[in-house]
Image: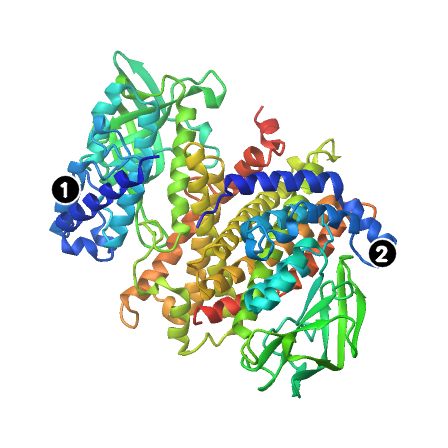
Amino acid sequence: MSLVLSEDQQLLKDSAKAFVDQNAPVSVLRGLRDSKDAQGYDQNLWRQMLELGWAGMAIPEAYGGFEFGYGGLGVVLEESGRTLVSSPLIATVLLGASAINELGSEVQKSELLPKVVSGELLLALAIDEKPHHRPNRIETSAVKAGDGYVLNGCKTFVLDGHIANKLVVVARTSGAIDDETGISLFLVDANADGVSINRSWMVDSRNSAMLSLNDVKIGADALLGAEGNAYPGLTRVLDIGRIGVAAEMLGSMQQAFDITLDYLKQREQFGVLIGSFQGLQHRAAEMYSEIELCKSAVRAALSALDDAEKIDAQIAELASIAKAKLSEVATLVSNEAVQMHGGIGMTDEYDIGFYMKRARVASAFLGDALFHRDRYASLNGF
Amino acid sequence: MQAIAQLEEFRQETRAWLEANCPASMRTPMVDAEVVWGGRKATFVNPESKIWLERMADKGWTTPTWPKEYGGGGLSKEESIILSQEMARINARPPLNSFGISMLGPVLLESGTHEQKMEHIPKIVRGEIRWCQGYSEPGSGSDLASLNTKAVLDGDEYVINGSKVWTSYADKADWIFCLVRTDSEVPKHAGISFILFDMDAPGVTTKPIKLISGMSPFCETFFDNARAKASNLVGGLNNGWAIAKRLLQHERTMISGFGLAGSQGDRGGTTSTMDSVERAAMHYRGDTDKISDPGLRDEIAQFKIDSAAFALTSQRSIEESKQGQGPNATSSMLKNYGCELNKRRYELLLSSLGSQALGWEGEGFANDEIAVTREWLRSKANSIEGGTSEVQLNVIAKRVLGLPDMLSLVQK
């Protein structure tokens, strides 16, 4: 396991940074928000990202991908986090494609993954049903009917739900509401009868939707993984998502910190730069230290995903370390960033508020710090 | 980089040598009383510690990467990593623990003359001389550069007058590496020299300081016309501040190790059954499957996650420094975070043990419970010694983050 980037990863990171700086500054997200863009992402920008191969980064060559690993996808996410890029990278590439890759049959993988790489297919993972992430607490039901199933239930906080062509729906085929067994995954066409999708306007101006399933009839070939036994595979997919989101958060928090540091070196009060005040210096130094820990947690977790010798329990532990730590520090850094900017930090015109809003949504997504500390404790037998 | 085959051969040889030479009791967890510090007054509670030290010192493996010329092991970085892996494989204890190895040696190798290295390095390698550090003074703590112990040249010797405080184990040490003022007419940083002398010299006295923990690891040290050979001034006259700062970086790197589970040394570490905070919490609360207090459980989980992320950061820092050179400004960050983690660990142990962590001595308290109480008190010094946490934060703000230095305005 390496905690420093390989030469290839560093090159990719540099080129991703150059691309994002030039083509996707925060003003792009601001524009999407102000125009209430129906898609909620810049399609032209996404086409360029597809051309750069970002959608196929972690997908095996056999399915049209570039097999550059999660380490590669991680640095792309980190750099796109720096300017809060809104794109299908998380919902389609990180979560949707991983779900198909981890749980799908040979037929499903060969049919769908190349379409992710080319951009023909957008995906969304529908798991949460209540305001808190509790992945084993699934009420949405899938009842066997003839050769297929009938789905009923409601989902919330479905990233990219309103732009996806296919939804990966987590549903219960048996068991009580909290049971890990009895959970199954299904691929559902977004335009199937009984599927209704309503966009949610989130505080971070990124894409999310509510989904309701009313007697949605699907065939047996829509099942992703084994019926009633999808939970271990789903957990791995969620961990991949948590680690990838942590990488994105790392980029965002580093940028928010850099912006703040610059401000401390420019703003004068009482005739001196405010960055000379010890009351601010020590808080900045503490943030720096926490960000360094975050960087290590993210690198370790990404590199574990690419390490075939790592078992799921090790991935789970590293995912929870990363997501707990990043969620905690993203909150700290974004709060401090606004505070240290003073009045200007409260204005919509200034970008720092966007970073705070994104930090909250990303922290809550796939489990906040409390969720992951609880999980870490359970994983370690206390 | 060495050839893989060559390194593999080294691994096999090392494994065989350790199997043949590491005594059985040296493969058991270290106990505080048996830590070997060396020196003229060294005592060996366990006679096998002495055998182990001698065998390792003969190979230079008490200091694996130091040059062979001065008695070190002469190993490459890759070989020394293999050695530590092979030692870890059989749980071999470190044969020698000393400030000579962790602090003085590295700067002497960087900045000493050939003669100085010939005189002092081999004795550090062999554990023959135990060193102490003469830095802080009663009026010079965080503002170390204001130090006032004077050294005046008299023939080929310096005459030293003044006093030091917080000198770790001065009463057990043979020699001291000491910061002295050799010029009072220039700005304070520019008149300091770094000098070595024998603690047995006439005019040197030490007095242990009793701490809140009841232990006395530190001394006051007094110099009354003590004499040091001018040839033992390291790094040039009035150039001591540069040497001092370099040495502090090595010291911080060492102290930051206290935040790493499993590598706790004498400063605030313990090898007792209290190694795992979460097990202690469950044991003392009578819990079986999980810690029944959700608040404590969350705090312990947060602590464990921070410890894991800190350990990964130390590892990353090592990987990064392989591409650069030695400790750098991140050593301040690691020192600070490591110390704060160790303090948190003891606070959590205190919460976990309840009133069993509140005894001082006598009946009703097991030895390892008393040890937790004492180490909890001891741990409070972690963020004071070697530069307070506040000083470390100043260093990060100034050197790493490039924030403007208000103190420089005050000092001018």
**Amino acid under disc 1:** Arg
Q: Quadrant of residue B384?
A: top left
Q: Secondary structure at mark 2?
A: loop
Tell me the residue at 83%/54% (across/down).
Answer: A33
Please indicate, yes or no, whether residue A253 appears anywhere in the rendered image: no
Please indicate, yes or no, whether residue B50 appears anywhere in the rendered image: yes
Q: Chain of mark 1?
A: B
Q: Is residue B263 left or right of residue A230?
A: left
**B104 versus B209 height, above or below:** above
Q: Quadrant of residue A162?
A: bottom right
Q: Chain of mark 2?
A: A
Q: Position of residue A272 (x, y in %)?
A: 71, 31
What label does residue A268 carry, if any? none
Q: Quadrant of residue B156?
A: top left
Tell me the residue at 44%/68% (across/down).
Answer: A380
Q: Secondary structure at mark 1?
A: helix
Nearer the observer, B353 or B91: B91
Q: Which residue is mark 1?
A: B55
Q: Position of residue B137 (x, y in %)?
A: 39, 34
What label does residue A37 carry, if any? 2
Badges 1 and 2, same chain: no
Colour style of the rendered protein structure = rainbow
Q: Which residue of the protein is positioned furthest toward the top in this rendering?
A: B155
**B7 versus B93 height, above or below:** above
**B189 versus A19 height, above or below:** above
